[in-house]
Structures are given as structure tokens and as C-alpha cells.
Amino acid sequence: MKKQSSIEWLVEQIASNNFVKASDQIEIIQQAKEMHKQEIIEAHEEGVERDYHGESEQYYKNTYETTK
């Protein structure tokens, strides 16, 4: 199963109108930023662990890309 990226999650939240108040918007945006930070950390760690060189596009496709 592919992971949902932080951007996909944020778009889903906006599209579903899960927030109306400004405070809700700020909370959702902060959560998306934290998710994105974790994605970067995990990608870096996996790249170091697997000794990826120039294969970042393939890592993204394997981890996040889905056919819709």
C-alpha cells in the first residue's frame, strides 16, 4: 500500500471542508508541515540505508505514487 503524501492529505482536508475557523486551518496546516518533515527525514534515512544515488525519483514513485 502506498503512503499518502502530506500534500495529498492537506488537499483532502481542504476538499472535505473539515475546517471552517481560522484556528482549524492553522492546525491542519501545521499538521501537514509536520507530516512533510517526517517524509523528508524518512526519505533521507532510507536513502542513506540503501545507498541510493540518483534514484530519488524511483523512491518517490515506489513510496507515494498511485495510479488513479
Image (cartoon, helix red, strand yellow):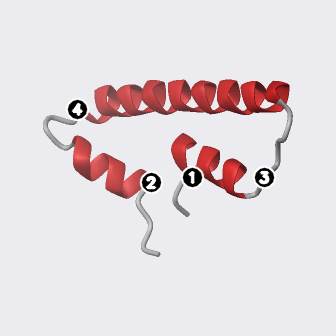
Which of label 3 and label 2 is nearer to you?
3
Disc 3 designates what residue? 17
Mark pair 3, 2: CA separation: 24 Å
Q: Secondary structure at mark 1?
A: loop
Left or right, residue 8 beside residue 49: right
Q: Is residue 20 above or below residue 51?
A: below
Q: Which of the labelled discs sits on residue 4, or is there none?
A: 1
| 1 or 4: tag closer to the N-terminus | 1
* Residue under the image location 60 percent in, 50 percent down: 11
Q: Is residue 35 left or right of residue 27?
A: left
What residue does disc 2 label?
Answer: 64
**Real-space Cα separation, disc 1 to disc 3, in angstroms:** 18 Å
Write the residue at 75% across / 32% down: 25
Task: Answer whether labels 1 and 2 touch (C-beta < 8 Å).
Answer: yes
Query: Which amino acid, by three-letter code, is at mark 2?
Result: Tyr
- Mark 4–mark 3 distance (CA, rounded to whole Å): 41 Å
Q: Quadrant of the N terminus?
A: bottom right
List the residue tagged with mark 4.
Answer: 51
Q: Quadrant of residue 35?
A: top right
**How much space separates mark 1 and mark 4, taking CA atoms?**
24 Å
Residue 33 pos. (x, y %): 58, 26
Indicate which disc, 4 or 2, sits on the residue closer to the N terminus: 4
